[in-house]
Image (cartoon, coloured by chain):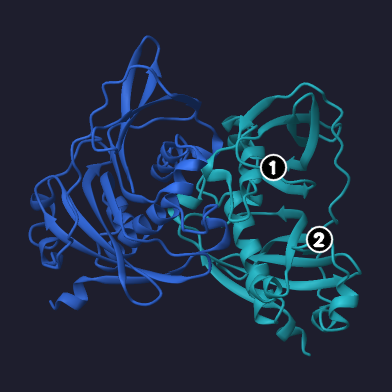
Chain colours: A cyan, B blue
């Protein structure tokens, strides 16, 4: 299979309500587009959610890392390219490139996915289930950004809390992956985004949260000026980690 | 001009993160699509925001009323049709139809827009500014739903409050019109949307709110079972009405 056939290309326009106060596409909307592109690309190759669901499996996003030099502005066309970097027993790595209106690549993203049995709720063995079928789509295009790294928050005083609401919940009854991105960035004051751009955004999904859960947000500035953020769910007296995120601003 | 040329038709698909826990497109996403279609239709006819901005004018959405028999489900294609119903001195009425994957019209919407001078912040005289140019696009297609009505909230105890955050703010520095729709529907518990569908959703935009504003939500159940909602902004000791909304569930 040629490299071209392995890379999916999808076109978008930065809609007026999808840009922030600086006129740039929001990270949540970009994340939504990336996940849609992953879905289109997989569906076109016989590994979409619909096909998987028929056999009682589904894709679960484990990690997402986005690194950017720039963002599309309001009304600008842009495109997203996506390809499969590797397939392991329990995970597959999918990469993305963000291409601006002039055809320049202005960012990349990496994602890590697991396949889960909807009956046992356990991860599926990708190699045993699909043999080389998934491997056929592996593409050797380079994704020149670091893999998702370690995010560690020792802080024990939350900087914010939030009770999840109707608009947070997806068709699976979980808080949707994109809403966590919005909630994380809402921890920063406007002045941050007036002065700086998000250079890198990382999120690791650890456990699910549900309607009415109280989410606690812990935020820690690191020595290198980046921010590590942990979202925990209050379960009675204990706290459960829901996701971790890293935000690098320049 | 033929009726066909006066009606714009735009195609969409219900994306996975754009449906709620019942698998139906959310009202906020539908609202976003309606406003985008208004923008496309106006731009194609020389009355888009970009053209207006060059002359220091802009469109301001005053009211939106949506009435539905059904909503598109996850992954379903659907389309939105839009046309201009009438042009008055200070307002123009734009209508919409929502068409499902089978070509059936499953809903309609009405919107009221003003044109504002970006210098004086005052409404412009559409007839004086554009003569018959806007009137040429008026279409006699019927929009068989009631016009936006009166919304009245006497209640003085807020049911919720919310401090606006980064993700609420649009390129103009205002809380974006779509976010108000989300915040209004977040006043209802999940059980409401498990048991009922939104038959009609209405919103009237009265004043702007900004980053860091404290919004207070007042909600009143009417004799006919509908809900009137008012969002007010706390300004020191006084409160200013920001928008009013009506939700009819069946």
Residue drawn at 55 percent across, 71 percent down: A11
**How many labels were placed on the picture?**
2
**Residue positioned most to the top:** B237
Residue drawn at 12 percent across, 63 percent down: B133
- Quickly name the residue at label 2: A120
> Quadrant of residue B102 in the image?
bottom left
From the top left corner, tell me how far across and down residue B113 is, in percent: 22, 48
Is residue B139 shown left or right of residue A148?
left
Q: Quadrant of the N terminus of chain B?
A: bottom left
From the top left corner, tell me how far across and down residue B189 is, in percent: 49, 37
Looking at the image, which is closer to me, B176 or B195?
B195
Is residue B99 shown left or right of residue B17?
left
> Quadrant of residue B101 in the image?
bottom left
Q: Are marks 2 and 1 in contact (CB under 8 Å)?
A: no
- For numbered disc 1, what is the local secondary structure? loop
Q: Are marks 2 and 1 on the same chain?
A: yes
From the top left corner, tell me how far across and down residue B14 is, in percent: 49, 65
Residue drawn at 74 percent across, 81 percent down: A6
From the top left corner, tell me how far across and down residue B215 is, in percent: 43, 25
Classify 10 Å Cα crowding around label 1: few (below 14), some (14-19), many (20 and above): many
Residue drawn at 43 percent across, 49 percent down: B28
A130 relative to B159, above or below: below
Looking at the image, which is closer to me, A187 or B19?
B19
- For numbered disc 2, what is the local secondary structure? loop
B106 relative to B18, above or below: below
The numbered mark, 2 or 1, whose residue comes first in the sequence reads 2
- Quickly name the residue at label 1: A209
């Amino acid at each position: 299979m040629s490299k071209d056939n392995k890379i999916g290309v999808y076109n978008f326009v930065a809609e007026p309500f999808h840009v922030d106060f600086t006129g740039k596409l929001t990270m949540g909307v970009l994340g939504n587009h990336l996940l849609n592109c992953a879905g289109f690309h997989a569906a076109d190759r016989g590994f979409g959610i619909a096909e998987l669901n028929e056999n009682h499996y589904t894709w679960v996003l484990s990690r997402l890392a986005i690194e950017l030099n720039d963002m599309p502005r309001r009304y600008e066309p842009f495109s997203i390219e996506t390809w499969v970097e590797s397939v392991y027993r329990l995970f597959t790595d999918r990469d993305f490139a963000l291409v601006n209106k002039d055809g320049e690549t202005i960012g990349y993203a990496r994602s890590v996915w697991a396949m889960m049995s909807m009956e046992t709720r356990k991860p599926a063995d990708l190699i045993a289930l699909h043999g080389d079928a998934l491997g056929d789509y592996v593409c050797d295009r380079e994704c020149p950004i670091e893999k998702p790294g370690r995010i560690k928050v020792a802080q024990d005083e939350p900087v914010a809390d939030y009770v999840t609401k109707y608009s947070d919940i997806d068709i699976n009854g979980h808080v949707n992956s994109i809403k966590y991105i919005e909630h994380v960035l809402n921890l920063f004051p406007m002045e941050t985004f007036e002065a700086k751009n998000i250079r890198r955004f990382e999120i690791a999904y650890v456990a699910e949260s549900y309607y009415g859960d109280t989410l606690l947000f812990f935020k820690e500035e690191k020595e290198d000026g980046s921010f590590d953020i942990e979202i925990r769910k209050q379960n009675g007296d204990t706290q459960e980690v829901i996701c971790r995120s890293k935000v690098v601003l320049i």
